Amino acid sequence: MTAPMVIVAGEALVDLVPRGDALWPSAAGSPVNVAVGLGRLGVATAFCGTVSTDGFGDLIATRLDDAGVALDLLTPVGLPTTLAVVHLDAEGRASYGFYLDGTSADGLTPDSLPSLPENAALHVSFGAIGPTTVPAGEALVHLIEREAGHRVVSLDPNVRPSAIDDLTATVARLEAAVAASDVVKASDEDLAALHPGVAPEEVAARWAGSGPALVVVTLGPDGAVAFGAAGRTEIPGRQVEVVDTVGAGDAFTAGLLGHLAGAGLLDREALRAIDADATTAALEHAVRVAAITCTRTGADPPTAADVG
């Protein structure tokens, strides 16, 4: 069986990453990082979204192209590139401030969404663009709902608390998208931000009962846990010397989807019947990909050769 193409949809932006006393530009955004991660792992990948015609937009397009990501579904727009200013704490954990209004993100609208090729899976990552962001977030929710049932749909809520204006509305729109998806990957921090005071695993188990075949929660250095046909599956993390965690969650997503694609499991019926061994293997691969990324500066996911 030929592994399906994965179409990654969402924002394309530039991270301004601190290096000494300066901020260095890095082509990023969770969807871009996932697409690059998949491309480097040898998975046929295309990016669906908007990119500015400015110099930063060229930087984003070049990064995707260098990773082997197809650009046929990429739409150029005459707006400045969306920016994220990255702050790293003493443990290398990242937080973000966004410059979103009036930028290339605004070019992503429900009417701008292209038709997607057959026999391809779809992955959507939120982030600076949340599910209630107008118009881009609404476009991504519309894309998920449009494609649900026609192809495997994967979702990463990738919650950015600084970008949320209305938590109640965000949760409502996001959970509708979760219910329409087949695979959902979230971090324990995502779930804690969406449902304060509720155990992340409790939220994940409830999500798994709402429609998805597989819900995976990353636990930082403690590994990951999944809920699916095999019940609850947990694996430990890998101990590495952390440089920073920028892009680690996106690398995990790429590792998870890449493994599922290669194992013939990026299929709606196969996901509904995934067993414990196959779930464990997918999680272990994803954790390894994320761990390698943590040993590098910035969102720099490994190649298939690096993973071994």
Image: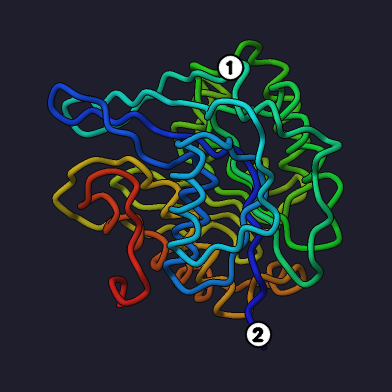
Crowding near the residue tagged with mark 2, few <14, some 14–19, many ≥20 C-alpha atoms within 10 Å: few
Q: Quadrant of the C terminus?
A: bottom left
Task: Looking at the image, tell me whether mark 2 or mark 1 is earlier in sequence order.
Answer: 2
* Real-space CA distance between mark 2 and mark 1, rounded to the nearest whole angstrom: 40 Å
Can residue 204 be seen in this snapshot?
Answer: no
State the mark number for residue 64. none
Find disc 2 in the rendering and name its residue.
2
**Where does the image place residue 42, in percent across and percent down from the top left?**
47, 74
The quadrant in which residue 44 appears is bottom right
* Nearer to the camera, 121 or 134: 134
| Residue at the disc numbered 1 | 164
Does residue 131 lie above or below 285 as drawn? above
- Residue 46 located left or right of residue 91: right
Q: Secondary structure at mark 1?
A: loop
Q: Are marks 2 and 1 in contact (CB under 8 Å)?
A: no
Q: Quadrant of residue 78?
A: top right
Q: Viewer-proximal residue, 97 or 253?
A: 97
Camera-nearest residue between 195 and 84: 84
User: How many marks do you count on the picture?
Assistant: 2
Which residue is situated farthest in the bottom direction here?
1
Residue 142 rendering spot, x and y as whole percentages: 82, 38
The image's colour scheme reads rainbow
Q: Is residue 21 above or below residue 93?
A: above
Is 166 on the left or on the right of 221, as rendered?
right
Q: Amino acid at mark 1?
A: Ile
Which residue sits at x=20%, y=52%?
295
